[in-house]
Amino acid sequence: MTVESLKFAKPQALFFKALAAHDRMHINGLLQEGPKNFNHIADELRFDHTLVSHHLRCLSFCGFVTHERNGKSKTFSLNKETISPLLKLVDRHLEKFAKNLYECETLER
């Protein structure tokens, strides 16, 4: 491993760790349908507002989501340039090569 590749190891690991968190994946999945305001996200997923706020801060910090202020509320969207295409690629991969992951219990441990 080169020094150059080591430089990217930590941020890449953090990228996938942030993306892979179960609750954040639920939020990302909901945002794949289109922009949603904060209350819609919390209500649709039945998550506590504090939890949604925490996860949206993380997703925003990582550049996974963007937001637009509408008066007192915010509307959140997936990053259309990178994250939306990435999640679509993952969906295509699952359908073509890894349908077994839909029923996998081994990796959930």
Image (cartoon, helix red, strand yellow):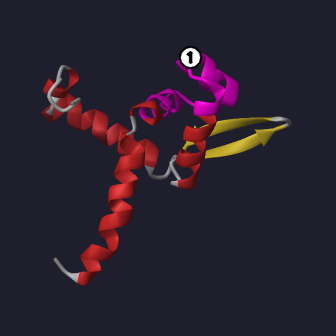
Q: Which residue is mark 1?
A: 46
> Which image quarter is the C terminus in?
top left
The secondary element bearing badge 1 is classed as loop
**Is 41 displayed left or right of 32 in the figure?**
right
Q: Quadrant of residue 55?
A: top right
- Going by the picture, which residue comes out furthest to the bottom? 3
Q: Residue at x 53, y 46 (%)?
A: 59
From what the image shows, is residue 19 above or below residue 42?
Answer: below
Q: Nearer the viewer, residue 42 or 76?
A: 42
> Which image quarter is the N terminus in?
bottom left
Instruction: Classify 10 Å Cα crowding around label 1: few (below 14), some (14-19), many (20 and above).
Output: few
29 within the magenta span: yes
Q: Residue at x 13, y 25 (%)?
A: 100
**Is 12 displayed left or right of 25 in the figure?**
left
- Residue 106: x, y in percent? 14, 28
Q: Residue at x 51, y 54 (%)?
A: 62
Q: Quadrant of residue 46?
A: top right
Magenta region: which residues?
A: 25-51
Q: Residue at x 69, y 35 (%)?
A: 75
- Residue 10: x, y in percent? 34, 65
